[in-house]
Image: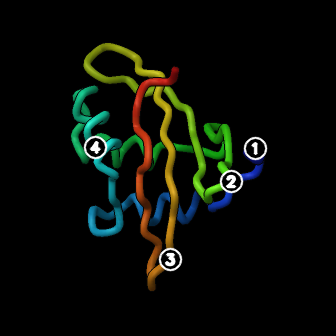
C-alpha cells in the first residue's frame, strides 16, 4: 500500500531533472513518452513543472507518482509520472512511468 507523503523532496526532483546528465528514463518510460510524441526536453519540462500538489502516491518500492496536465500541440494530456531518485554525489532522477492517466 502506498503512502500519502512523498519519499523524495520536490526540490531534489527539480535539481535532478534540470540536467540531462542526471535525468534517466527506463525503456518503458522512454517508449511511452515517444508514443505520446514527447521529446526528452518535453519530459524534462514536465518534471520541472511538477509541484507538491501534483503528488498522488508514494509506492512502497521508493517511487513517487505524480499526476499533472500538460498542454501539447493544442491538446491537454492528463499525465501520470512515476519517478525514483538516488543520490550519488548529486541527485539522479529515473522516470519509471510516463503515460496518460488511466
What percent of the width, then of the height, locates residue 88? 45, 82
Q: Residue furthest bottom?
A: 89
> Depth check: 73 or 102 in front?
102
Q: State the quadrant of the N terminus.
A: top right
Q: How far apart are the alpha carbons under marks 2 and 4?
A: 23 Å
Picture residue at 65% right of the left edge, 46% below the top: 52
Identify the residue position indicated by label 2 in the image.
60
The numbered mark at residue 87 is 3
From the viewer's perspective, tell me whether residue 4 is left or right of residue 67: right
The numbered mark at residue 30 is 4
What percent of the width, then of the height, locates residue 14? 48, 58
Picture residue at 25% right of the left edge, 46% below the top: 41
The numbered mark at residue 1 is 1
Q: Are marks 2 and 1 in contact (CB under 8 Å)?
A: yes
Earlier residue among tags 3 and 2: 2
Say few, some or many: other residues with alpha carbon within 10 Å of mark 1 (under 14 / 14 to 19 / 20 or more).
Answer: few
From the viewer's perspective, tell me whether residue 38 is left or right of residue 9: left
Amino acid at each position: 500500500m502506498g503512502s500519502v507523503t512523498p519519499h523524495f523532496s520536490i526540490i531534489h526532483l527539480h535539481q535532478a531533472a534540470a540536467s540531462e546528465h542526471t535525468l534517466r528514463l527506463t525503456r518503458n518510460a522512454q517508449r511511452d513518452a515517444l508514443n505520446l510524441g514527447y521529446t526528452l526536453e518535453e519530459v524534462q519540462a514536465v518534471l520541472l513543472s511538477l509541484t507538491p500538489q501534483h503528488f498522488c502516491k508514494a509506492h512502497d518500492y521508493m517511487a513517487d507518482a505524480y499526476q499533472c496536465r500538460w498542454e501539447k500541440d493544442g491538446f491537454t494530456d492528463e499525465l501520470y509520472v512515476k519517478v525514483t531518485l538516488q543520490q550519488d554525489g548529486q541527485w539522479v532522477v529515473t522516470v519509471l512511468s510516463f503515460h496518460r492517466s488511466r
